Image (cartoon, grey):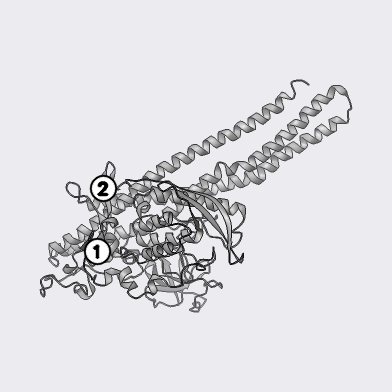
């Protein structure tokens, strides 16, 4: 009897050694023994590797072939840097239907847009990542880095500095801590008397879950404690359409211009530098792609419930080709626009350092880089920085929140499918214009030219005007063919660039929704314990209060997404139709010129 399993959910592989799953797909298992929540096996496409154990249901069915040998067969031959396990990891027994797979993993017959899918940090294949940083160390290598980066697992120490406020999530209530006791380093305020309740909210045993990795679980269970500076506060306000991020009081924009090839080490190393000009400073700085890559990594780690836009794709070869440089600059311009438009991301210290630090001041750049990497307001502490409204409407109805989030989840699934379909259609149409349409129009033009050449053999004076008119018609069709080939750059390419950017946003929301859903699950569990008399009401109220903070932030991010979506697609569709009109006007003008050549015949 061969070991087999049926996939309960879609799963997208993100790291070497993993394989993608499709819902209802039957897999062959190497072993029924999971490795820290992961199983090894072969999917229906013959790929071998790891996948989450909670995503499948083990079944037993007769099979003629023995199970495959246990090995990591799909690790690339090249030296990829190992990446962390996937974030979208939902236990089947606890979570509802998972978020849909991006197209690349779902087996679509055409490739996704370049931004699509989950982002992977630089692996050295682009722009020489580590060749001019100060040294090879990172904040994780430094003493105490782990405790500062993940303060929810250790007690916060030290005294409060001016402008800093010590905040905790009532860790003294010892909700859900390991073994039912309160967290280490957070003694009960009574000095000895612990909680009398006989039940605690359970902890998610899957340490790869987004809810756990983001610090959402530790925050909701009351294990976060830290000092929050005034500048770190992120305010959510009640707007006309629900929770919103407080607007940036000093909005600005930033242009990305003049990509230039530069060298160092006496020409041995080459790279492309982009000129950035923020409107609020007016001072230009130059940044390489690796600087964008570093910034993205810091922001994606710091803001677990904010959709940080994905960067344009990396490319190991052809990095200095004009078309690639132009395409990347446009992608970075879209990325920069979304960064500047976000009330939280635009004011982040790391982003402001990226925009304002002089390109020639290497020391200042390194200091700012180190400061960003040592930021303590990540993990569970990030949620301490969120300030929500008080008074009427300050407590959200959890059923209404869940309904809104489920509705947004359905919306993003449909939008992702539609964006993928439109991207495929536009790409195919552009390909036809560049090759097929141009060729067909020029074939017609060549036929008219052959007819004109034949008529010229007549040698009759009165036919010269007709011959010239037909020859001009041939040239007109040849020109129209060139117009078709050039047109996608004006209208279809910008649409596909926008779709690519939004596919990146849509790939971010499963993790954001998972954090919010995890918080709601803890609230439901605590309420059940209260009804059963196993938990004190005060503890349950603390969990609900912290879930309320996460819900405010999630709904504010959803609201912002819809705002920029309406703005961007309105602008882009207007541009598309304007360019289409100009194109057909050019075609009509060329045909009218050809028509008038026959007036004097």
Residue positioned 34% across, 72% down in the render: 145
Tell me, yes or no, if residue 476 can be seen here: yes
Total count of labels: 2
Category of crowding for the residue at label 2, using alpha-carbon neighbours closer than 10 angstroms: few (below 14), some (14–19), many (at least 20): many
Relative to 584, 284 lies left or right: left
Query: How far across and how far down the image is residue 62, in percent?
Result: 46, 74
Quarter of the picture holding the C terminus:
top right
Q: Which residue is mark 1?
A: 227
Q: Quadrant of residue 299?
A: bottom left
Residue positioned 67% across, 36% down in the render: 480
Check if mark 2's residue and mark 1's residue have beta carbons within 8 Å. Answer: no
| Of the image marks 2 and 1, the number of the one nearer the N terminus | 1
Q: Quadrant of residue 95?
A: bottom left
For the residues labelled 2 and 1, the Cα–Cα distance comes to 22 Å
Numbered circle sitting on residue 237: 2
Q: Nearer the viewer, residue 305 or 230?
A: 230
Residue positioned 40% across, 57% down in the render: 353
Say which element carries label 1: strand
Query: How far across and how far down the image is residue 384, in percent?
Result: 25, 60
Numbered circle sitting on residue 29: none
Quarter of the picture holding the N terminus:
bottom left
């Amino acid at each position: 009897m061969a070991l087999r399993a049926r996939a309960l959910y879609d799963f997208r592989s993100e790291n070497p050694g993993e394989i993608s799953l499709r819902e209802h797909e039957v897999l062959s298992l190497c072993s029924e023994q999971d490795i820290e929540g992961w199983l090894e096996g072969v999917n229906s496409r013959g790929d071998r590797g790891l996948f989450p154990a909670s995503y499948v249901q083990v079944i037993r069915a007769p099979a003629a072939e023995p199970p495959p040998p246990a090995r990591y067969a799909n690790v690339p031959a090249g030296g990829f840097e190992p990446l962390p396990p996937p974030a979208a990891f939902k236990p089947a027994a606890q979570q509802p239907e998972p978020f849909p797979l991006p197209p690349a993993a779902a087996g679509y017959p055409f490739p996704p847009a370049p931004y699509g899918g989950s982002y992977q940090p630089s692996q050295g294949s682009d722009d020489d990542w580590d060749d001019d940083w100060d040294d090879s160390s990172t904040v994780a290598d430094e003493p105490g880095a782990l405790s500062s980066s993940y303060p929810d697992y250790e007690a916060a120490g030290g005294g409060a500095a001016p402008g800093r406020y010590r905040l905790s999530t009532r860790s003294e209530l010892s909700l859900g801590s390991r073994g039912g006791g309160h967290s280490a380093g957070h003694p009960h305020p009574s000095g000895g008397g612990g909680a009398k309740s006989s039940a605690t909210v359970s902890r998610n045993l899957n340490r790869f879950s987004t809810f756990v990795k983001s610090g959402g679980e530790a925050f909701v269970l009351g294990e976060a404690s830290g000092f929050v500076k005034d500048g770190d506060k992120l305010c959510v306000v009640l707007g006309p359409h629900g929770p919103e991020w407080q607007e940036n009081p000093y909005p600005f924009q930033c242009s990305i211009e003049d990509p230039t090839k530069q060298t160092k080490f006496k020409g041995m190393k080459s790279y492309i530098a982009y000129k950035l000009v923020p409107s609020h400073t007016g001072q230009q700085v130059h940044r390489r792609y690796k600087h964008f890559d570093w910034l993205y990594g810091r922001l994606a780690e710091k803001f677990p419930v904010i959709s940080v836009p994905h960067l344009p794709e990396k490319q190991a070869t052809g990095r200095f080709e004009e078309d690639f440089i132009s395409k990347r600059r446009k992608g970075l311009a879209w990325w920069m626009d979304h960064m500047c438009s976000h009330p939280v991301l635009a004011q982040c210290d790391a982003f402001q350092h990226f925009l304002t630090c002089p390109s020639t001041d290497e020391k200042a750049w390194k200091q700012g880089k180190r400061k960003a990497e040592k930021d303590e307001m990540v993990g569970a502490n990030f949620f301490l920085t969120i300030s929500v409204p008080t008074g009427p409407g300050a407590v959200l109805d959890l059923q209404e929140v869940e309904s809104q989030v489920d509705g947004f989840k359905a919306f993003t699934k449909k939008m992702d499918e539609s964006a993928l379909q439109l991207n495929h259609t536009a790409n195919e149409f552009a390909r036809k214009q560049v090759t097929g349409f141009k060729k067909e129009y020029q074939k017609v033009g060549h036929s008219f030219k052959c007819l004109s050449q034949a008529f010229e053999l007549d040698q009759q004076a009165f036919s010269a005007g007709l011959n010239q008119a037909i020859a001009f018609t041939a040239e007109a069709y040849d020109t129209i063919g060139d117009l078709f080939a050039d047109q996608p750059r004006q209208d279809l390419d910008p649409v596909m660039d926008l779709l690519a950017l939004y596919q990146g946003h849509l790939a971010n929301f499963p993790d954001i929704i998972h954090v919010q859903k995890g918080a709601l699950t803890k609230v439901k569990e605590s309420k059940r314990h209260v009804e059963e008399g196993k938990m004190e009401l005060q503890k349950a109220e603390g969990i609900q209060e912290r879930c309320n903070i996460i819900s405010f932030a999630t709904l504010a991010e959803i609201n912002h997404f819809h705002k920029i979506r309406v703005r961007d697609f309105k602008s882009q569709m207007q541009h598309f139709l304007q360019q289409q009109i100009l194109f057909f006007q050019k075609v009509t003008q060329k045909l009218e010129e050809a028509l008038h050549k026959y007036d004097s015949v």
